[in-house]
Amino acid sequence: MQKKILITYCIGFALSSIIPSTAQYVRVGDQEQITMGKLDEMENLLSGADVGQKVDLLTRLGIDPVIGKTVVEELLPGQKIALKLVRAQQETHYGVAFLPSFRGWFLYLLQGSDDEPQNHPWHVIDKQTLDCWHQFCVLELMALRRADADDLVVHNVNYNHGSNVVEDQTQVLSILNGKLVQTMVTQDFLSEGTLGSPTEIQTEHLSTFLRFPDRSLEETRTIAVNEKLEKVERRYWRWSNQKHRFIPSRFVSVVPNP
């Protein structure tokens, strides 16, 4: 009998070691809560949690429960709540929560610690709301100002839409003095057409971005008219310590490959 008990105990211990998520829920009343822990662990647990558990964790992070409930209930296929570490050259530990919603995408700056999440739990200290209207916003973390610090690059932020026109932006948000500060903005997509003309003309501008080892951000823009490529041009964005923002060079025409 003792041997069977010992075997059962060993099996349970082994399973708990290979399925860590089972140890990261705590029961409060009749409901299990996701434990406040490391950002990547909480992100993984959110994917398998129910609506109440997701809203509860977002609320404990400091996110408005109404916003949290709306986001959780209206997640589309392929969308998820992202919790990411952000490198900073300061002693302060930063992270971000990126919440998708057709009513507006929400970007929260978090402060806390992955090393000591129980003593320094993650919590919201700043917030930005982004309009992503017709498609998904995309968040990238890039070292653009310093090699040891990340900036937040958000693509497909809608700037203008209406009858026969859609205009999106790429924005860079930097953490300055504990706040999310917009330090760069540029058009990354424009589609517009003529109205009431015998010959319809559809013009499309599309920018792509590439980070270089010197931390400059290359922007390559193509311009097409009625789906025919008319122009390719390129410029570079670099950080200015004096102006505390990214400054672009002039666009230079590029000859496309035949």
Image (tube, rainbow, N blue to C red):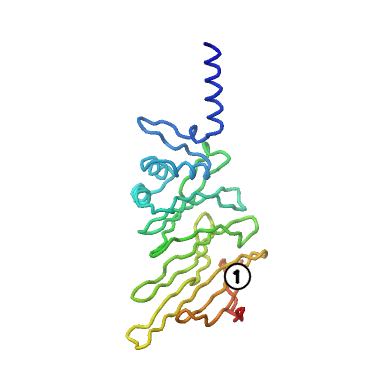
Q: Hey, which residue is sitting farthest front in the picture?
A: 258
In this view, 123 is above or below 183: above
Q: Residues within 10 Å of mark 1 (few under 14, many from 20)?
A: some
Q: Position of residue 170 (x, y in %)?
A: 50, 67
What x and y, as percent, mark residue 231? 54, 81
Q: In the displayed structure, would residue 72 be above or below residue 255?
A: above
For the residue marked with disc 1, what is the amino acid? Glu
Q: Nearer the viewer, residue 3 or 23?
A: 3
At x 53%, y 65%, the residue is 183
Read off the residue under disc 1: 218
Q: Would residue 206 be found to the left or right of residue 240 on screen?
A: left
Looking at the image, which residue sits at the far right?
214
Which residue sits furthest bottom?
Answer: 198
Q: Position of residue 177 (x, y in %)?
A: 53, 56
- In the image shown, does 93 or 142 lie closer to the viewer? 142
**Residue drawn at point x = 35 percent, y = 46 percent:** 65
Quadrant location, the C terminus = bottom right
Q: Is residue 81 left or right of residue 91?
A: left
